[in-house]
Image (tube, rainbow, N blue to C red):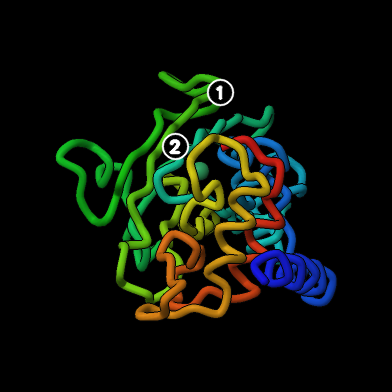
Amino acid sequence: MKKAIFLVALIASGLVLVHFGLKQVAAVSATTPAQFTLFALFSGWNSTLPPGSVNPCTPNGAGTCNPALTEFRGVIFFATIKAVSGDFDHIFALYRAGTDPNTVLQSDCTPPVSNGCIKATGCVGTGPGCVLTRTLSYNATIPVEGSFNGTGTIRYFCTIHPTLMHGSIALYKDPDVDRNHTVDVVDLATVALAYGSTPGSANWNAVADINNDGKVNVLDLAFVAIYYGSSL
Ligand SMILES: [Cu+2]
């Protein structure tokens, strides 16, 4: 019976992947999703417009314009921020969800941090005090267990040019459910065994509710399938 559920779940997750075209964002490598690189351009992070362009890149949230990123609660992610020759100096910073780009200031991230700033790098570029590459690591603690109000969200900005250079990071529970650093068949099976459950169900397992919506369904299974084989 359990094997049957698992097989059905596997097939269902494959169908969802095909049907809805769920995919990882371009800035995240398939094998090491917790490491990503952002190129700092005035027109938008990872913009493909020429360096120095003052036109905003479009569409926002695409891999080549302020990409929407996906990371995991409890898995430290590493961002590599690269200056682009011919563009301006920039500062990468993480902020709490809901931060208005029009209010973001460099001083937010100077201790004691304020206005929702979580963490920032120094500047990338060729100006005084700037370097060509910076890195930033962060260990997310959201979504909060038991909240069931969906994924967690944080935002990223350039604190010098926040209205053009900003994007979001969706935070899911760790698809490496058993934390053995590989998303493998055990993780898929764990979600499959909780399939169809809600809090209170006999087979409910909170860690299997990857998108934190209070039900373990095909979306959770598909999410694990997307990252299958990844090192976390
Ligand atoms: Cu900037």
Which residue is identified by label 2? 76
Q: Which residue lies at the image location 75% right of the left edge and 73% below the top edge?
A: 8
Q: Position of residue 128 (x, y in %)?
A: 43, 20
**Label 2's element?**
loop
Q: Is residue 39 visible?
A: no
Q: Amino acid at mark 2?
A: Ile
Q: Position of residue 96 (x, y in %)?
A: 33, 57
**Label 1's element?**
strand
Q: Where 151 falls versus 64 (above or below)?
A: below
Q: Nearer the viewer, residue 126 or 172?
A: 172
Q: Residue pushed farthest left?
A: 112
Is residue 153 rendered to the left or right of residue 10? Answer: left
Q: CA distance from mark 1 to mark 2?
A: 19 Å
Q: Which residue lies at the image location 38% right of the left edge and 41% below the top edge?
A: 139
Q: Is residue 120 visible?
A: yes
Q: Amino acid at mark 1?
A: Thr
Which residue is identified by label 1? 133
Q: Residue pushed farthest front?
A: 1
Quarter of the image that includes the C terminus: top right
Q: Position of residue 120 (x, y in %)?
A: 37, 37
